[in-house]
Image: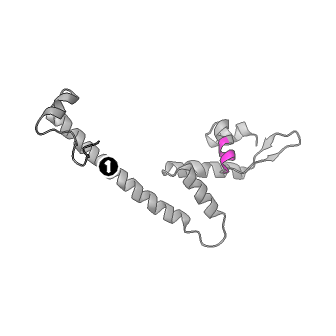
Amino acid sequence: MRPGQLAREAGLNRQTLRYYERRGLLPEPDRSLGGHRDYGHDALVLLRMIKATQRLGFTLDEIQDLLAIGSHRGPRPGLRAHAKKKITDIDAKIADLQSMRADLVSVVEAGCSDLQECICVSESPMPFTGLGASD
């Protein structure tokens, strides 16, 4: 299939397709006699897999690592190990977001109308704890 058709079916644009090729995520396709790129069905499957993996929170670098691991024969513990690490990363982000939310709730409940007012009150709701003097 031609690049435009592949991009449409994969839900990407042509520039993304070329970018994935340059990064080595997508192998360079065969060429027709006229020199046009000609992708097989496996390219569509690979692109859908890349998109699904991105939705799980993996970066393109991580996906490239996973694809490299998947190309080896034998046991492939890569996905499981990467997924466990990603879960740990997500849990840390969730904890950070919950902390930020609690701080924002404190700011709202304090009724401050502007930043200066919130900073100047003795029981400031602003999250100054943990900040160094040079921050």
Task: Tell me: 36 left or right of 63.
Answer: right
Q: Position of residue 40 (x, y in %)?
A: 75, 49
**Residue position marked by numbered label 1 in the rendering:** 96
Say if the magenta span includes residue 47. no
34 or 6: nearer the viewer:
34
Image height of 134 relative to 86, above or below = above
Q: Position of residue 108 (x, y in %)?
A: 19, 34
Part of the protein shown in magenta: 19-24
In the image, residue 20 lies in the stretch drawn in magenta: yes
The local secondary structure at tag 1 comes to helix
Relative height, residue 70 to residue 24 (above, below): below
Residue farthest to the front? 134
Task: Name the foreground residue: 24 vs 51.
Answer: 24
Q: Is residue 112 visible?
A: no
List the single residue furthest toward the left: 122
Q: Relative to 55, is 26 on the left or the right? A: right
Q: Amino acid at mark 1?
A: Asp
Q: Is residue 16 visible?
A: yes
**Outermost top residue:** 113
Give the position of the N terminus as an image quadrant. top right
Task: Name the one closer to the observer, 121 or 92.
Answer: 121
Q: What secondary structure is the magenta-colored segment mainly?
A: helix
At horizontal 32% and vertical 49% (from top left) the residue drawn is 96
In the rendered image, the quadrant that contains the C terminus is: top left
From the viewer's perspective, is 29 left or right of 80? right
